[in-house]
Image (tube, rainbow, N blue to C red):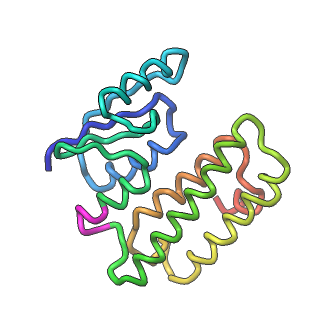
Amino acid sequence: MSQPVYHYLTLGRLGRGEVLNLFLKDAGIDKKDILYPWDETWSAASEKLTQQGITRTGQLPALEYKGSVYTQHIPTLRYFARELGAYDGETNQEKYIVDAVADLYVDWRSQWAASLSGATDEYKNKVAPKYYSVIGQYYTDHPGPYLLGDKITYADFAVYQSIDNERRTGTLPVSISMIY
């Protein structure tokens, strides 16, 4: 594999890019990191990256790999799972479950990001508890620490990141925080 170039923001462990970062580390994929400050210079940097074709949306993460640029962290995880022949289900049913949980994470994430300036009561009392309840139902279907039992999937990284982000921002529901 050629070495990917990973473009991301200096957000520490928060954000979409950390999901991809953890996945690549677990897969043993070395990458070159190019980090951009999340400050008053970001708007100009975002425009420049868009003009250079590094991102179509003006957002990061973006990953350059084998002459292509991959954006949107969940589709990028799906791509690498397929590329590696790992981190996904083996049957179509298992792949469906992994995709379904990843899509639930995407839906949750947009609500979580919108609550960063101050979590609403609706987010704390309805959105987050419902997300973790539904995710929990999927995880109880297979014995083991991961979505499909003993085999880690790309969706497991996203779910882990959702729990970690909620814990760091103080929005993790009490019922979940007692477990983690």
Q: What is the x, y in percent for residue 179?
A: 67, 63
Q: Is residue 7 magenta?
A: no
124 vs 4, left or right, is right
Q: Is residue 30 visible?
A: no
Labels in figure, total: 0
Magenta span? 81-86
Q: What is the x, y in percent for residue 74?
A: 43, 55
Q: Is residue 8 above or below residue 132?
A: above
Identify the residue at horizontal 54%, vertical 40% (top origin): 14
Identify the residue at horizontal 50%, vertical 63% (top origin): 102
Q: Is residue 156 visible?
A: yes
Rendered-image quadrant of the C terminus: bottom right
Q: What is the x, y in percent for residue 51?
A: 34, 26
89 vs 108, left or right, is left
Q: Is residue 35 above or below residue 163?
A: above
Q: Is residue 83 magenta?
A: yes
Which quadrant of the figure has residue 98? Answer: bottom left
118 vs 70, left or right, is right
* Residue at the limit of the structure toward the left, as seen here: 1
180 vs 58, left or right, is right
Identify the residue at horizontal 35%, vertical 34% (top origin): 7
Q: What is the x, y in percent for residue 144?
A: 49, 77
- Magenta stretch: dominant secondary structure: helix
* Residue at the limit of the structure toward the top, as seen here: 40
Identify the residue at horizontal 14%, vertical 45% (top origin): 2
